[in-house]
Amino acid sequence: MNALLRHNEYPFLIKYAILFLIFFHIIHIFDQLYIFDQNDIVIFSLKVETCSRCCQTTEGVLDQSVTKLRYYETLERIRSDILSGQFSSGMRLKIADLAERYDTSHMPVREALRMLGGEGLVELEPNKGVRVRRFDRAFLENLFDIRVSVEQMQARRAAEQRTSQQLVAINAARLEFEAAAKNADVLELLTCNRKFHAAISVAAKNSEADEIELRHSRLLPMLWNNLGYPRERVSVVIDDHRHIEAAVSDRDANAAAILAAAHCLKAKQDMMVAWEHYEGKQNNR
């Protein structure tokens, strides 16, 4: 390059023409570098923006998960207090008091009460608020009349079409109840009882009947905890479960239906006695 620019070898204009070309080439190189840097900045900016959006999306998903978790936690705690008898039948439930009790906001409490209303555990009264489900003798009699019909039908169908695997599940549920009967509280005992009848329902394959049983199974713990569960029932229930399982195992549909109906009628009789004691106490207050 130095040889090309020697004054003694090239005319004046050619020298400056070469210098101009060299200068233009350098400018072009810097221009390309500038464009490259600009693209890098754009790409980097897009990546930063994408990461920011991902963080915002993740934060939104986490917020929704926390909200759902808080809602279900509140729902379970209110339901548990109703089923255990902490909130007695007819008791008014105020959203502000419940929010303070469970250390949450009003929204999870309001949504939980709406769900519990659908389950039949609370009564939603327009312009009056919410109260725990009230019941009377007629309600209890109607409930068990329905249960007698449903339970005997479920036991019959289970005996007719149960599989060996379903029979194993029924046996496991029965044994779980018997193990819990030794020292379990009423709520745990009734939960195990529900598992036994649920196992029979699975074998019966009647989803419509399952919905009725599910609704009743949510009400029964509340009713027994309000009225008082007689511990002497436990040995009777164990004996009934064993006979029902044996009939289902033998595929004796008629026996299974009769035993299941008798099982429900005994429960009805015990609850009516408990209701009379409960009503007497209420009238003496």
Image (tube, grey):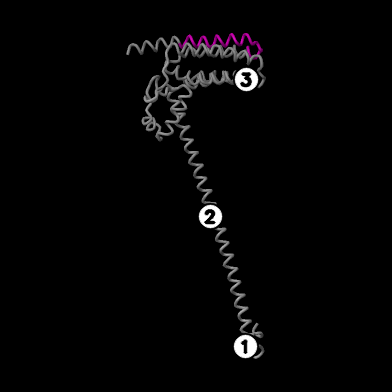
Front in this rendered view, residue 14 or 214: 14
What is the spatial separation of the Cα atoms under label 3 and label 2, in whole angstroms?
55 Å
Q: Residue at x 40, y 33 (%)?
A: 106
Q: Magenta span: helix, strand or loop, mainly?
A: helix
Front in this rendered view, residue 190 or 215: 215
Q: To which residue does mark 1 refer?
A: 12
Quick check: 141 left or right of 210?
A: left
Q: To which residue does mark 3 refer?
A: 205
Q: Nearer the viewer, mark 1 or mark 2?
A: 1
Q: Earlier in the sequence, mark 3 or mark 1?
A: 1
Q: Residue at x 48, y 24 (%)?
A: 118
Q: Nearer the viewer, mark 3 or mark 1?
A: 1
Q: Earlier in the sequence, mark 3 or mark 2?
A: 2
Front in this rendered view, residue 53 or 19: 19
Residue 158, disc: none
In x, y percent, where is residue 171? Answer: 61, 19
Q: To which residue does mark 2 refer?
A: 48
Quick check: 97 left or right of 34?
A: left
Q: Which segment is the magenta one?
A: 247-271
Quick check: 258 left or right of 108?
A: right
Q: Quadrant of the N terminus?
A: bottom right
Q: Earlier in the sequence, mark 1 or mark 2?
A: 1
- Report which quarter residue 13 is drawn in: bottom right
Amino acid under disc 3: Lys
Secondary structure state at the residue bearing disc 2? helix
Secondary structure state at the residue bearing disc 3? loop
Amino acid under disc 1: Phe
For the residues labelled 3 and 2, say whether their Cβ atoms are less than 8 Å apart: no
